[in-house]
Amino acid sequence: MFWLLTICLLAAPAAYAGKAHTHGVAQLKLSVEAAQLNLAFELPLDTLVGFERAPRTPAETEAARVALARLREATALVKPDAAAKCRLLGSQVQAQVLEGTAKPGTERPAEPQHADASVSLTFECEQIAQLGSVELALFDSFRRLERVEAEMVTPKGQGKATVRRAAKNLRLPR
């Protein structure tokens, strides 16, 4: 049953369909199951690059390239507790508008002025029981990011938390 809840929780971007799109605010779905730590982020493009459309100028193209490169550096985005001995198994970044793969008007038909990037990360942890927190290092890469709204499901319970730049460690339910 726990795996079903985990799958539902991490079903991004559908899981975010009802969430308000707020500049400066990222959404995070985190789950722990067996020895795996799974994280799924939704970040407004305005928070990443200052615009939410395809790049139009050389400066915007460069900003998009830099943002995508930073998003693909998974271990620079999050840092699980060292005691848990986690290693990255896989990551996926989707930002069709920045990558130039979105068809005009398909980013978000109901709100074409808004666009997001999605990042999914999976870690395998040797000592998963020692995982008490995750540092959200993505604050260091994206200065427009003000806070991360997190929802968590772990074997120890469920929880919600707001993480801000000044204290970027997300404590997991105990």
Image (tube, helix red, strand yellow):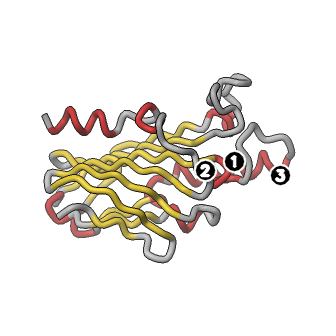
Residue 69 tag number: 2
Q: Is residue 132 above or below residue 58?
A: below
User: Of the residues shown, which amino acid type is indicated by label 1?
Assistant: Arg
The residue positioned 53% from the left and 65% from the top of the image is 139
Whether label 2 touches label 1, CB < 8 Å: yes
**Which of pointers 3 and 1 lies earlier in the amino acid sequence?**
3
Quadrant hosting residue 115: top right
Task: Using a 10 Å C-alpha cutoff, classify the residue at mark 2 as few (fewer than 14 neighbours), some (14 to 19) or many (20 or more).
Answer: few
x, y percentage for residue 99? 67, 36
Task: Using a 10 Å C-alpha cutoff, classify the residue at mark 3 as few (fewer than 14 neighbours), some (14 to 19) or many (20 or more).
Answer: few
Q: Disc 2 versus disc 3: distance between alpha carbons?
A: 15 Å
Q: Nearer the viewer, residue 132 or 66?
A: 132
Q: Which residue is mark 1?
A: 65
Residue 59 tag number: 3
User: Of the residues shown, which amino acid type is indicated by label 2?
Assistant: Ala
Q: Secondary structure at mark 3?
A: helix
